[in-house]
Image: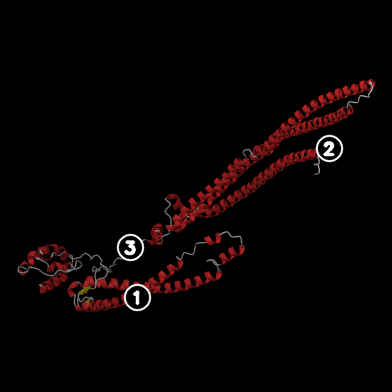
Amino acid sequence: MSTPRFKKDKEIIVEYESQVKEIRAQLVEQQKCLDQQTEMRVQLLQDLQDFFRKKAEIEMEYSRNLEKLAERFMAKTRSTKDHQQYKKDQNLLSPVNCWYLLLNQVRRESKDHATLSDIYLNNVIMRFMQISEDSTRLLKKSKEIAFQLQEDLMKVLNELYTVMKTYHMYHSESINAESKLKEAEKQEEKQIGRGDPVFSIRMEDKYQRRSSVKKIEKMKEKRQAKYSENKLKSIKARNEYLLTLEATNSSVFKYYIHDLPDLIDCCDLGYHASLNRALRTYLSAEYNLETSRHEGLDIIENAVDSLDPRSDRQRFMEMYPTAFCPPTKFEFQSHMGDEVCQISVQQPVNGELILRFQQLQSRLATLKIENEEVKKTSEATLTTIQDMVTIEDYDVSECFHHSRSTESVKSTVSETYLSKPSIAKRRANQQETEQFYFMKFREFLDGSNLISKLQAKHDLLKRTLGDGHRADYMTTRHPNGLFKTLTGTRRARPRSVFNVRLFNGNLESFIKPWTTELTHSTSGTHSEACWGGLCCLPSLFSSISPALNRVSPHAARVLFCLSLIRL
């Protein structure tokens, strides 16, 4: 069995010094790493400052451009009537209101972006500068502490080196003393072996041998004492070495496991929290910018929702009352003292008027049917146009979907409403439909204008001729078989120019002898007050007397005779 090979002192020292050298190199590298970390942070903070400084310049330039844009168009509108109306009561046409709100939104965005630029310059950048200064200052203090800790660690390692060498020295002396003791013991054994009893030895030789044994015993005692002393010192040195070794390992472990993270934390002291606050200031500014922008856009959206053509038409006509107010009616201009201002129904023009009334009635019935068909076609075409112009093709959210591939963005944009083939086709269809609509609308207007003129003549002839000349040819049969009076737009009956009071002013007493046996009768419509009054009970005669007093005497006589026939 081979004996184990023990390391020599020199090998142990070389190995220990190599390990300490590695630790020393690590300590130097740690200092460099802390310096590099701080340099990277300072550079990052400098880049952030430069970035926000440039962004502030861009925001300010954008703010100025928005202000110029708004001012350019506001200057054009300040002298207009719409602007004066807007400053007075803000009662504008809905498109004009949208335009003013759009300009106000541009001004609002201009102020917001100027505020954002000021926040970047005087708040966010200042925070980054302070963080950079704090990082440099904290690194300096942390390096001082780290240097002190490393010095203490090196002292512990040097102390271990000293204790280890002391242990090696005492252990070597102990080994040497042990070997000398063993050598003395061997000599003693040899001397004792020579001391076997031989009776033939002379007295002188016996005295010399006894003296040698005493010397060997004395030398053995000295070496035994030396060995014991060195052995004790070796034991104490080994114990001290083991204690120091444990303390050194504990110190090294504590430095690497606890002290270094604490040192790094000292370098990071407040860095992340301060950076968090600075970036949250940026986020707060951007979010509030978006909030302000959304508030303005909500106002514009409400105005867009309020786009109403009918209300705008009313406002437009109220804005120009002199242009759109209906003129006064044309009055009859008598000539050379002619005081008659009504259509004359005396013979021989009476028959001609009745024939003309009948022709107008027939012509109106035909025109109304034709114009109603044109109106339906026009309304259907208008509905088609409204469907075209109200199609919900304004959602462009797909264009803002971020993708790593730029091709997908281009393809998305190309498929939108803005693609040239699509918009060209839409506009061609819209213009064709608009052309057809205006053709039908003009046809409807021409027909309705003609109907309006003929209806006015018809109504005037009807009022002039009165219901006394009512006949079957003056009625049209209703689909349910009943007779329906053809009436146009009801107008106020002109006041009679005659001041004669008929029937002595009391119709009831005048016709009472003929109506004593009358118990009930059919009643007419409210529009035929004269007919209904004459056909009702005698208690109603007093209510129609003023109506008869407003017609000409001839017409009153005709109505009265016809009423007697019906009775």
Secondary element at tag 2: helix
Secondary element at tag 1: helix
Q: Is residue 486 left or right of residue 300?
A: left
Where residue 26 appears, x then y in whole percent?
A: 74, 41
Of the image marks 1 and 3, the number of the one nearer the N terminus: 3
Quadrant where the C terminus sits is bottom left
Q: Is residue 466 left or right of residue 393?
A: left
Question: What kind of residue is marked 1?
Answer: Glu
Residue at image position (41%, 62%) is 309
Of the image marks 3 and 2, the number of the one nearer the N terminus: 2
Give the image quarter of residue 190. Answer: top right
Dot 1 crowding, Cα within 10 Å, few <14, some 14–19, many 20+: few
Question: What kind of residue is marked 2?
Answer: Lys
Using the image as rendered, state which of residue 253 and residue 307 is in the foreground. 253
Above or below: residue 454 compared with residue 47: below
Using the image as rendered, state which of residue 249 and residue 553 is in the foreground. 249
Report whether residue 203 is seen. yes
Dot 3 crowding, Cα within 10 Å, few <14, some 14–19, many 20+: few
Using the image as rendered, state which of residue 228 and residue 19 is in the foreground. 228
Q: CA distance from mark 2 to mark 1?
A: 122 Å
Report whether residue 122 is seen. no
Question: What kind of residue is marked 3?
Answer: Thr
Residue under label 1: 373
Residue 335's mark? none
Of the image marks 2 and 1, the number of the one nearer the N terminus: 2
Q: CA distance from mark 1 to mark 3?
A: 33 Å
Above or below: residue 74 compared with residue 405: above
Residue under label 3: 328
Where residue 134 appears, x then y in whole percent?
A: 65, 37
Give the image quarter of residue 156. Answer: top right
Residue 10's mark? 2
Cβ–Cβ under 8 Å for marks 2 and 1 = no
